[in-house]
Amino acid sequence: MLDDIDSKPENLNYEVWVSGHSLGASMASLVAFELAGTPFKRIRKAVKCATFSSPLTGCEEFRAAFQTLEKEGLLQHVRVSNQEDFVPAGWPCSLSFPPRAYKHVGINLQLDDKTCEFNYPTKTNGLKRSWDTSFLRKLGVFFGKGGAFGPMGYILKYHGESVINDRMLDMSGRAEPYYTPNVVLASEVTKPYSKTNVFEQLTVDDLYNDESLHGNFPYALKTKSTSA
């Protein structure tokens, strides 16, 4: 696949997108990571990855390497999930001893019935992100609304793609909650966004251009500077 992408001159202005759902989402983020770290001759733009309902994918070292590629402008990843979905909460760690905690990567768009929120792994929101993706939080949401479906029906409903699709298409009265205030301020400088369909006009580049969202990729590997 890498040779095919890089062998055609017409691919010079193309973008590479990788996408997947559930286990396929985790695999998609790994493929995007591999592609972004490959020195292409013709693909000059960032590899873009869109995933849905992804489980945790890698350890701290993977997150650091992933953020390094993001910081270098080689990789962009938006991970979409439902607040009620249990799958993004586990498997939380490796089976090695001592166990190593797994981490999410990319910009997360988290959806529920009333609100939507963008967040990114920074050193100031770790507790909130840990709580939002914890099993305790998921259980609390389940007991609050899961009785009507039963355990398996609940899991299948909120892990499936249909609820995500419906929530992302439901724009009536919900355009502004999709945006965090910082993203609105940063993006309105360059684009005349409409208040009624701002989410439809939002691009992955807009999110990655907003340093207040990603915090300049705080877990990225530190590069050594060289003096002449």
Image (cartoon, helix red, strand yellow):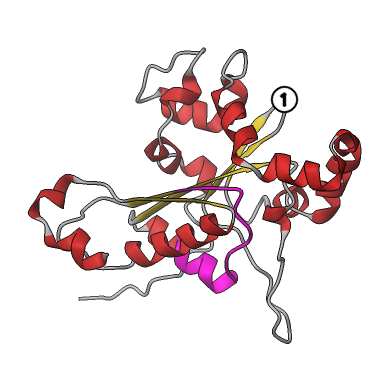
- Characterize the local packing of mark 1: few (<14), some (14-19) or many (20 or more) Cα atoms within 10 angstroms: few
**In this view of the protein, which residue sits in the foreground, 222 or 12?**
12
Residue stretch rendered in magenta on the structure = 50-66
Determine which quarter of the picture holds residue 122.
bottom right
Depicted 174 relative to depicted 143: above or below: above
Which corner quadrant holds the C terminus? bottom left
Spot occupied by residue 148 in the image (x, y as percentages of width and height):
88, 33
Spot occupied by residue 132 in the image (x, y as percentages of width and height):
74, 47
Spot occupied by residue 66 in the image (x, y as percentages of width and height):
46, 63
Name the residue rendered at 19%, 62% in the picture: 4
- Mark 1 residue type: Lys
* Residue 191 showing in the rendered view: yes
Does residue 59 show up magenta in the picture? yes
> Is 132 displayed left or right of 148 in the figure?
left
Determine which quarter of the picture holds residue 58.
bottom right
Label 1 residue SS: loop
